[in-house]
Image (tube, coloured by chain):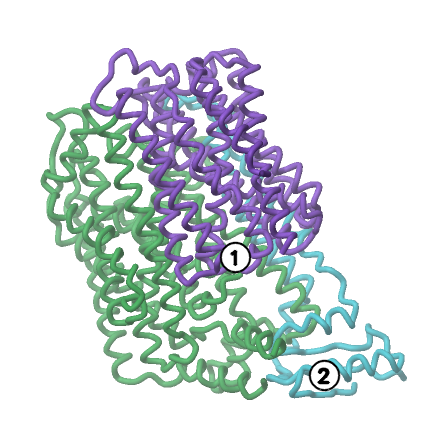
Chain colours: A cyan, B green, C purple
Amino acid sequence: MKQLMFDDKDAFLAKLRELLAAGTKPEQIAVCTPVPVHEAMVLLQVPESKLRWFTFVGAFTGLLSGFGLTIYTVWSWPLITGGKPLVSLPPFTIIAFELTILFGAVLSLLGFMFLSRLPAVKQIVTPVETGNQYAIFVEEDR
Amino acid sequence: MKAFFDKVEREVLAGMQKPRVTYWLALLVAAGCFGIGMACWGWQIYSGMHVSGKNNPVGWYMYITPFVFWVGIAHSGTLISAILYLFRAKFRKAFNRSAEAMTVIAVLTAGLFPLIHLGRVWYFYWLTPYPNQRHLWINFRSPLVWDVFAVSTYLTVSALFFYVGMIPDLAIARRLISGPRQWLYRILSLGWGGTARQWNHYERLYMFLAAFATPLVISVHSVVSWDFAMSIIPGWHTTIFAPYFVAGAIFSGCAMVMTLVIPMRKFLRLEEYITLDHFEALAKVLLFTSLIVSYAYVVEFAMAMYSGNVFEVAHFKFRMFGSFREAYWLMVFCNVLLPLTLFVRKLRRNLVYLFIVAFFVNVGMYLERFIIIVTGLAHDFDPYAWGNPNLSWIAIGINVGAFGMFFMFFLIFVKVLPVLAIAELKEEHAHETAHV
Amino acid sequence: MKRFPLIAACALLVALVQLDKSGTHLLPVLVGMALAMGGVLVVAAAELSNAKWIVPVKRPLLAVAPVLFVFPLLVKIAPYPWLAHENAWLRRDFFVARDVVALLVVAIVGNLFRRASLAESAAKGKWAVAYILTFAVVKTLIAMDWVMSFDYPWVSTMFPVLYMVECFCAGLALLGLICFARRKSDGVLYDTATLLFGFALFWGGLFFAQYLTIWYGNIPEEVGFYTRRFAIRGGKCLFATNAILLFGIPFTLFLIHRARQNVRVVTVVSLMILAGLLVSQLFHIRPYVHIHLGLLVIQLVIMLGVIAATISIAKDGSKCK
């Protein structure tokens, strides 16, 4: 594993372009940066994040759960309060709205952790710190 | 650029080093107040709810007032973090970490009050929908149940947002802070490495959480306002409550952010990162929300007079000239008149003046919730049912305890977690120097 | 010389409105007012928040400000039920006087702001604040006087707030249509679409809040507002259409990131918002006003034509530079 450290973002990007031009495959290169570097993401052909699917599934589940919970429980124990209809949509919409956001947010976090392979137990136990330098890790071909 | 990165890390993390005597004194006072509050609560559980001062007709008094107050304070944190992020407002970076911490602590504080108000706090789980042997379910048509869902969701999502925002900063703390504390940062940072893929997913996550938090903020305080608006009591049953309460929440929350950040900036020597320009921007938000709150006061009163409804007119006359008139006019001074002075630029850039205004705004907003709740209940339809609540030292003690708990947790936050979003400051600096 | 047809059209509109006893004029005038006041409002908000993205479209958007001077002439008493028993606040002379003065003041302040903003003077922030404050007062007054008084003594404190937010949405819709005229998909389009998304959501929340409060309380004095309108044929349909046009469609379409970058989608949504405004006014005044379709169409066409003409004149003016 070759490790290259740079203090300066432009030098880091120049070396990255050089490596890719020399024929190194993007899958063999990993970078660690103190701030997100979008040019590097483009160079390494990092695909668009699939996180939005986790978010959408979470939010949709929340919406269904909200209406499902409220409507099922009111049919199960049909108690009329305040003269309102049994299945009263305005209040049930509020519950569904809150659960949409709750499930959407929680599933987004879980999705992020899954997609980023966090928690990275090896990194927790023995952290490899690159600090404020821009690092390139290249897997050597055997 | 690296020099700036190293410098900002060093200076922000310096705040997390060994505290001085002033810190311990402040923590002692806060913890003392918290202890008083807990003792009072214990006494209330032992003696019964009569010690809280509430009675018939004023069944909601000194526990619902702080509930709404603290939920309101929490909202500003999410506004600064999430909503200003979506609007791409740069001045947010000076405050967002402290504001997010303030949000989480304030929601925790607020969440205690329905439990305190319950009396038999050990039955709190009856508020949640769990399957039980008697086939009972909670009443989803009740605004109090909407509260349970809204505040729980808000606590979870704001804690998530606070935590996620901190992950890169926790990695920095892991690198620079040694000793037994380092294990805390190692675990909490989840082994964050800053790889391109991680940053890619991270930026998406942050944006989604901000996009979720924004309607959540508005909905939570709307739901809390509907605790009152869903009734038929004059002064409570009015359609404007949702945006009026949300604006009031942001108003009181901005004031609390100022109250917290002005001294924190001085004690942790962060003048370079939190500048007068930042405070001026915050003062403008304060002024704007003050105008919205003033508008709501005027419109409510004007509509009551315009409609000629006997009960509405009587209610507003009671607010202005009844048993609580001193509190009402003090509230008008603090919320409507005093913030108008912020139209003057010099005053907006004077930190001592801002601190004083923020204090009075906090007082005014606490009084506003008090006025709405108590005058609404004390003086509704039937004169036979009119009555005032009793002054209660236990209730005052518990309120003092809540303030103590809030400041105590905030002081602990200041020493354990970074008070500025270091990674975001670095990113902003990288963008600015790149364009030079 | 180019201005003459415009002034003639305005004069025709004033004549038609003043001769219209049915109250039909409320629809086109309220929609036109929302567009004109809303357009200036969007620029004022952008100036105060130092939003740089609006600079390319500031001139056409502010071009509607002179139209504000027409509205004081369009104040006409509709068939209000309270005309039969007037009181201190609701009487013909005071009603007309205060509305004319209010609309004149907002026209003056709006145009002074326009001048300061286009000249990029140091005082433009102060004029933006002045316009926003004036707008809030005047729009509240108009909403209360022109529409809410139909149901006197019914009140809803949210009513003027809904009108103000609809006005801002109208300004954004106008901006969306200006983007269509520019035929460019850039930051202006994207930010307009994002703001439309946010404000559609905000409007939806407020609309729901008003309905929920009145539905839940179920007090006879209040609930009549909705029951009177649902009892008429097509009332419930109008209510649902209003919500779908001003919230449902903008919200669901603009959830998709790519939709916010597409000029055609933004144009369609902007037109839907304008339609939604019309439906909203119709829903509010229908129990009391017999709408004359012919008068409505003519007045609406002239109103929208005047606004479109002022914008295109400004665009041509800026091209000459």
Q: Tell me the amino acid under the disc marked 1.
A: Phe
Q: Give the mark toward the camera: 1 or 2.
A: 1
Residue at 25% x, 33% y: name it.
B302
Give the camera-side residue of C301 and C30.
Answer: C301
Q: Which one is nearer the viewer's eye here, B328 or C272?
A: C272
Disc 2: which residue: A12
Q: Please give the name of the residue rendered at 54% of the width and 28% of the height, measured from the top-left corner.
A: C9
| Residue marked by disc 1 | B87
The percent position of residue B249, horizontal first and vertical second, equals 35, 51
Q: Report the amino acid beneath label 2.
A: Phe
Q: CA distance from mark 1 to mark 2?
A: 31 Å
**Screen quadrant of the C terminus of chain C:** bottom right
User: Which residue is pictured at 40% across the width and 74% down the height?
Assistant: B274
The answer as to whether the residues below labels 1 and 2 share one chain is no
Please, is residue B376 above or below residue B278 in the view?
Answer: above
Residue at the extreme front = C1
Residue B208 percent location from the top left of the image: 59, 55
Q: Report the chain holding disc 1.
A: B
